[in-house]
Image (cartoon, rainbow, N blue to C red):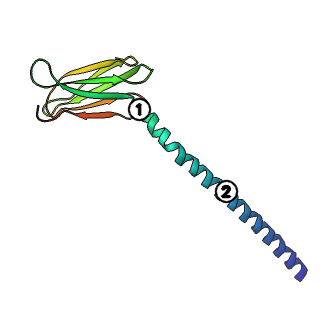
């Protein structure tokens, strides 16, 4: 009977060592995967950045500002632009922006907030200065 217990103990010990080895292998693979994810994170963040620049100009005629949006990608961007004025209701417009081209959003007032969105990208937010 003692031999049977000894054999069972040996089997359990071997099984435990095998499980411990598998656990260590899994920990190593997890650490490798986490390192690869950390290396890719800047690429993911860059990929989500909407490839546009924005620039505010004083309106050429009358008060307010014009916002120019330039597409820096080689792809057509379908933009959803939401203007939230400091007073009044929001308005939304859609613009198709060809590669390397510029589109303008006009008649912006002081304190207006503009959000520019495109599918697959993080939105860009611009706030018009309160004073001209």
Residue 47: percent from left, percent from top: 46, 34
Residue 1 vs residue 126: left or right?
Answer: right
The residue under the point 70% across, 58% down is 25
Quadrant containing the N terminus in the rendered view: bottom right
Give neighbour class at mark 2: few <14, some 14-19, many 20+ (Cα, 10 Å): few
Q: Secondary structure at mark 1?
A: loop
Q: Secondary structure at mark 2?
A: helix
How many labels, in total? 2
| Residue receiving disc 1 | 121
Q: Quadrant of residue 94?
A: top left
Q: Quadrant of residue 24?
A: bottom right
Indicate which disc, 2 or 1, sits on the residue closer to the N terminus.
2
The residue under the point 90% across, 80% down is 3
Q: Quadrant of residue 109?
A: top left
The residue under the point 57% across, 51% down is 35
Task: From the viewer's side, name the closer residue of 130 and 16.
Answer: 130
Whether the residues at callouts 2 and 1 have beta carbons within 8 Å, the answer is: no
Residue 99: percent from left, percent from top: 40, 18
Residue 32 vs residue 14: left or right?
Answer: left
- 56 lies above or below 76: below
The answer to whether residue 51 of the structure is visible from this angle is yes
Residue found at the far bottom of this picture:
2
The answer to whether residue 1 of the structure is visible from this angle is no
Residue 70: percent from left, percent from top: 33, 23
| Residue receiving disc 2 | 26
Give neighbour class at mark 1: few <14, some 14-19, many 20+ (Cα, 10 Å): some
């Amino acid at each position: 009977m003692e031999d049977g217990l000894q054999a069972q103990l040996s089997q359990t010990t071997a099984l435990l060592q095998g499980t411990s080895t598998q656990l260590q292998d899994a920990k190593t693979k997890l650490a490798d995967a986490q390192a690869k994810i950390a290396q890719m994170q800047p690429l993911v963040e860059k990929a989500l950045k909407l490839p546009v620049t924005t620039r505010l100009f004083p309106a050429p005629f009358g008060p307010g500002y014009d916002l120019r949006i330039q597409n820096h990608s080689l792809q057509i961007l379908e933009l959803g632009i939401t203007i939230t004025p400091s007073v009044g209701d929001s308005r939304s417009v859609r613009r198709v922006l060809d590669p390397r081209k510029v589109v303008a959003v006009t008649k912006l007032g002081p304190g207006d907030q503009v959000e520019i969105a495109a599918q697959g990208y993080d939105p860009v937010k611009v706030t018009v200065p309160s004073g001209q």
